[in-house]
Image (cartoon, rainbow, N blue to C red):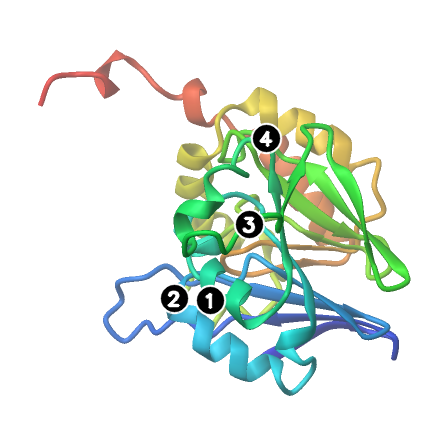
Amino acid sequence: MAIELFNDGKHLCLMFDDLVDDTANVAVQANQFLIVDNGHGALIDPGGNMTYNGLLMAMHNYFPPKRLEFILASHSDPDIIASINKWMIHADCKVVISKLWARFVPHFCSVGNAEGRIESIPDQGMNLTLGNCIIKAVPAHFMHSEGNFQFYDPISKILFSGDMGASIVNHNEADTPVTDFNAHIPTMDAFHRRYMVSNKICRYWVNMVRQMDVEMIVPQHGRMFKGKKMVNEFLDWIENLPCGVDVMTQDHYRLP
């Protein structure tokens, strides 16, 4: 089922949260996103082979998949772009990804399929034109990938934050915005302590986001933070969280 995050008649943001088959409880829940502006479409983090068929069919209700212009990839993990070859066969789209991962993308593709179709994002980020709007690729390096970007939509004021803000929840909970932040912390804590590289990096990111007009932070896993109050509660929490190399000790580096 598609969840409408924003719609003003010309600009549409959708989230798909229930396309991973969790019957065997072997795969982490993942969200996929579609932005459509004046008839132009981009997918953010379309996922792997588990999500491809469901996402393709669900998209038909809102936008013709063959007309996709961009696949926007926060990083290169399998749950982000393992299905990329199928999308590139189905649509004449470009893949937009960090310059650090651009030369790795062809490993997901048939020989020659990626040639001339990968657009590298420089470390400082970039603006992408989609229809009549600009989508901003925002630096999020080392959260958790070395070359990592989030995507900010100034019209909807949504920050599609990739793994930052992710929570490990049941598949039927991901479509519900967070309303009690303290109760939500246990679903995020272990993930962020391990997957974010350091508190220093988190603080740099928070300083950047505080300068942006963000009404919603929507991660690639789990529940979203909707409204300034909840966005700020998350920023306050992650700004002070020891994580990654901060919490590693010699005990983590021992012979088994």
The answer to the question of whether label 1 and label 2 lie on touching residues, with beta carbons closer than 8 A, is yes
> Residue 231: percent from the left, percent from the top?
71, 49
Tag 1 secondary structure: helix
Circle 4 crowding by C-alpha within 10 Å: few under 14, some 14–19, many from 20: many
Rendered-image quadrant of the C terminus: top left
Residue 97: quadrant of the picture: top right
The answer to the question of whether label 4 and label 3 lie on touching residues, with beta carbons closer than 8 A, is no
In the displayed image of the protein, which residue is found farthest to the front? 112
Residue 203 visible, this orientation: yes
- Say which mark, if any, is on residue 49: 2
Residue depicted at x 44% and y 62%:
83
Residue 1 visible, this orientation: no
Circle 2 crowding by C-alpha within 10 Å: few under 14, some 14–19, many from 20: some
The disc labelled 2 sits on which kind of residue? Asn
200 or 114, nearer to the observer: 114
Sequence order check: which comes first, mark 2 or mark 4? 2
User: In the image, which is nearer the foreground, mark 2 or mark 4?
Assistant: 2
User: In the image, which is nearer the foreground, mark 4 or mark 3?
Assistant: 4
The residue at which mark 4 appears reads as 141
Residue depicted at x 44% and y 77%:
53
- Say which mark, if any, is on residue 86: 1
Q: CA distance from mark 2 to mark 4?
A: 26 Å
The residue at which mark 3 appears reads as 182
User: In the image, which is nearer the foreground, mark 1 or mark 2?
Assistant: 1
In the displayed image of the protein, which residue is found farthest to the bottom? 61
User: In the image, which is nearer the foreground, mark 3 or mark 1?
Assistant: 1
196 or 45, nearer to the observer: 45
